[in-house]
Image (cartoon, grey):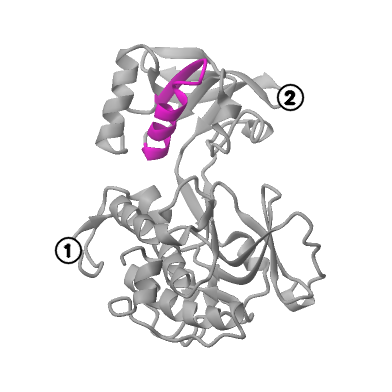
């Protein structure tokens, strides 16, 4: 259903912002910076549990060589620098949630609803979702669907929900290692399972994990899960195949981190003009076919499009200028340079 056909959505209990940025990758983060410069209060929503998008999730240690003024920078370093840059603007971040619904209300503002039931109202929406929403890869285990959301989780929404649990974490990347380190102090027991004794995560995280194993606070198993045991969605134990044979491991919560796949997801149903799962935009404002909805970064398409972070930064700058006219229709935007504008420098906390 196109947005202009959508029924009005009640705003009771919804949180209001000037703009919502969907996607916390590098381009989404820089969009926060550009919006902040023109006094637009922003909320960022991402399905992942941390900022950085594909850069930080899939190749945090991989060097990037085409960011201006940075001869080499890793995905995680770039994310950290961008987070530092946008700090003065106080954007609100919502992680581990996906925007499922987007409708235009009678007052012209957009009403968004996440898969967690959270409702948000904004004058402007900026889609910076890269290749689309990340969907966790499901382990090839019979009957796992019955446990999902009850005792098998692909993201940690609240650490407290796992306090006192017998937790099994499966995977060998940064997510598996980070949650091993974070949950070890509060879990009743924690087992980390990986198919080999080599890990793809940050070296310092691997060192900390092995230290916890040496102290007996974490159990490390090398093998694969072959069977889930439990009833009514509640896990009780899993069967693990190791080099020495099969072993039954007690677990009432399992966190599989098997990587992510990218899908356009709910965006496809928002009534926007698409071309092969990419959102068509103009090159003046990077606005979509719906006024007030912009798309920047890898998810958009226009003549001459290059899928570069650099290109996304440029798109975000022009988007913010256009967004200002929607958020502040009664004000005139005076274009300023950060090098010479005392007001911009004051916003950035450098003067």
Query: Could you tell me if residue 331 is visible in this image?
Result: yes
Distance Cα–Cα, label 1 vs label 2: 54 Å
Question: Is 179 inside the magenta-drawn segment?
Answer: yes
Query: Could you tell me if residue 276 is visible in this image?
Result: no
Q: Is residue 142 left or right of residue 107?
A: left
Q: Residue at x 71, y 49 (%)?
A: 117
Q: Is residue 211 above or below residue 29?
A: above
Q: In x, y percent, where is residue 296?
A: 47, 72
Q: Quadrant of residue 124?
A: bottom right
Give the magenta-colored segment's residue range: 173-193
Residue 71: assigned label: 1
- Callout 2: SS: loop
Residue 83: assigned label: none
Reading the image, the residue beneath label 2 is 232
Image marks 1 and 2: residues in contact by CB distance under 8 Å: no
Q: In x, y percent, where is residue 5?
A: 79, 76
Neighbourhood count class around disc 1 (C-alpha, 10 Å): few under 14, some 14–19, many 20 upward: few
């Amino acid at each position: 259903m196109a947005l202009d056909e959508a029924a009005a959505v009640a705003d009771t209990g919804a949180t209001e912002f000037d703009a919502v940025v969907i996607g916390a990758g590098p381009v989404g983060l820089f969009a926060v910076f550009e919006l902040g410069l023109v006094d637009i209060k922003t909320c960022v929503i991402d399905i992942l549990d941390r900022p950085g998008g594909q850069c930080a999730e899939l190749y945090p240690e991989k060097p990037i060589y085409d960011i201006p003024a940075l001869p080499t920078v890793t995905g995680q370093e770039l994310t950290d620098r961008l987070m530092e840059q946008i700090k003065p603007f106080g954007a609100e971040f919502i992680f581990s949630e996906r925007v499922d619904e987007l409708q235009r209300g009678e007052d012209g503002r957009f009403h968004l609803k996440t898969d967690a039931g959270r409702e948000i109202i904004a004058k402007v929406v900026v889609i910076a979702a890269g290749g689309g929403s990340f969907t966790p890869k499901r382990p090839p285990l019979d009957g796992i669907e019955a446990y999902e959301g009850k005792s098998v989780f692909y993201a940690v929404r609240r650490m407290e929900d796992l306090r006192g649990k017998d937790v099994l974490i499966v995977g060998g990347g940064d997510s598996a290692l980070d949650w091993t380190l974070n949950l070890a102090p509060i879990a009743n027991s924690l087992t980390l399972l990986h198919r080999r004794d080599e890990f793809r995560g940050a070296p310092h995280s691997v060192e900390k994990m092995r230290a916890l194993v040496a102290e007996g606070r974490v159990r490390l198993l090398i093998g694969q899960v072959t069977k889930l045991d439990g009833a009514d969605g509640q896990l009780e134990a899993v069967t693990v195949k190791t080099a020495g044979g099969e072993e039954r491991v007690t677990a009432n919560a399992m966190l599989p981190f098997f990587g992510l796949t990218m899908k356009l997801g709910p965006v496809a149903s928002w009534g926007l003009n698409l071309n092969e799962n990419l959102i068509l935009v103009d090159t003046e404002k990077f606005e979509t076919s719906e006024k007030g909805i912009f798309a920047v970064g890898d998810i958009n398409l226009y003549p001459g499009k290059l899928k570069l972070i650099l290109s996304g930064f440029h798109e975000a700058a022009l988007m913010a200028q256009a967004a200002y006219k929607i958020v502040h229709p009664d004000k005139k935007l005076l274009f300023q340079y950060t090098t010479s504008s005392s007001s911009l420098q004051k916003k950035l906390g450098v003067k």
